[in-house]
Image (spheres, rainbow, N blue to C red):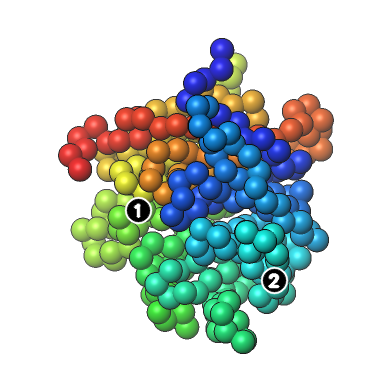
Amino acid sequence: MADPNNTVLPSPPFDTISCIKYSPTDPDKLLVSSWDTSVRFYHAGEPNSKPSEQLAKFEHRAAILTCCFSDSSHGFSGGLDATIRHLEIGTEKMVTVGSHTDAVSGMVYSDESNALVSGSWDCSLRLWDPRASTPQQSVTTTPERVYCLDMTNHNIVVAMASRLFNIYDIRNMATPAQQRESSLKYMTRSLACMSDGQGYATASVEGRIAVEYFDPSPTAQAKKYAFKCHRHTMDDVDQVYPVNALAFHPVYNTFASAGSDATVSIWDHVVKKRLRQYPKFGNPVGALAFNCDGTRLAVGVGYNWDLGEKGMHEKPGTEICIRRLGDEVKPKNWSG
C-alpha cells in the first residue's frame, strides 16, 4: 500500500541524482541536479492542492554534481565541465559566472555576504560575487581535492580527499580558521552543518557518522563522537553501506542520513539516539534536503554505481520522494 506521507515528483532525472536543494524561502520549491546533465526546478504539491510539477529545466554540457539557491528565483550549478553557472529560474536563462580547472564538487551561497563559495577537484575554493563585472573575488588553495562543503553562520566546512577538513570564516577565506583530520577511518562521503551553528556531522563510505563541534576547547571536543549506521547482517555477514547524504532539520537540529542500503534515518545527536527509520526505498538514496520550514524531506533515490554497470541494469530508474514530516523529527524533550 502506498505511504500517504510520501509523494513522488513527476519528470525525474534520467540518471543518478547528485544534489537536492530547497528554496530558502518557499517550502514547496526545490532544485535537483543530476548526472544526466540537467538541473530541474520543481513545485512539490500536496495531494489536495496544486499538483507537483517540473517548472523549469536547465540543460548543461556535462554531469552536474552540485547546485544551490541564492534566492527563491535564482540559483547556481556546477559539475564535471568545471563551470559555475547562474540560473534565472523564471526565464530558464543560464549565464556563465566563471570556472575552475576541474570538476565543481560543492557550493554554498551566503545571503549576508551576497557571495557564492564553490569547491573543486582542482584543490581550490573560489569566492564569487555574481553581480560584479569580474565575479571571481578570491581563490583559496586547499591541500587536497574538495569533495563537499557546507555553511552555518560564518563557518564554511570543507571536506577533502585524504580525510582532511578545513573550516573557514567566509569573512576571511585566505587561511583556514581550523584544520582537522576526519574522526572516521575511511573516505568522506557526506557532510552537513548543524542548524544551531555549533558544529557539523560527516559520514564515510564505511557506514559511520561522526558528530563534530567547532569550539576547540577540550570541554566541547569531549562531546564529539562517531557511530555505526546503514549496516545490515545477512547470513551472519555484516553488510556495510556508504552514507551518501546528511541534512539537519532547520527547526529541531536533528538530522537525517541516507545510505546505499536504500534507507533514511532520523537522529537526535544530542541524546545519541535514532528517532526513526523510514520504510526502505527501492534503490540507494543519494541526496537529501529539508525544506525551509522543516515540514518536508526530499529524498533522491536511484542507482549510484556502487556495484558498477551490472547494478544499473538490475535496478534502473530514479525518483524524487517528498516525505511529509511529523513529530518523528522532533527531539523527545523538545520544549521550543
**Which residue is at the far left?**
335
- Residue 161, picture quadrant: bottom right
Residue 77 to residue 248: above or below: below
Q: Quadrant of the N terminus?
A: top right
- Residue at image location 40% in from the left, 38% down from the top: 295
Is label 2 in a helix, a strand or a loop? strand
- Residue at image location 62% in from the left, 86% down from the top: 134
- C-alpha distance separating marks 1 and 2: 31 Å
Compared across the picture, whether 112 is left or right of 310 comes to: left
Give the camera-side residue of 143 and 24: 24
Q: Amino acid at mark 2?
A: Val
- Residue at image location 47% in from the left, 25% down from the top: 5
Compared across the picture, whether 329 is left or right of 149 comes to: left
Residue 243 to residue 88: above or below: above
Q: Amino acid at mark 1?
A: Ser
Crowd band around label 2 with a 10 angstrom C-alpha radius: few (<14), some (14–19), many (20+): few
Task: Determine if residue 205 is in view.
Answer: no
Res 95 label: 2
First of labels 1, 2 by sequence position: 2
- Residue at image location 62% in from the left, 59% down from the top: 90
Give the camera-side residue of 89 and 233: 89
Residue 335 image position (x, y, % from top left):
17, 39
Compared across the picture, whether 301 is left or right of 111 comes to: right
Compared across the picture, whether 311 is left or right of 31 comes to: right
**Which residue is at the far bottom?**
133
Crowd band around label 1 with a 10 angstrom C-alpha radius: few (<14), some (14–19), many (20+): many
Residue 186 image position (x, y, % from top left):
55, 49
Is label 1 in a helix, a strand or a loop? loop
Task: Determine if residue 314 is in view.
Answer: yes
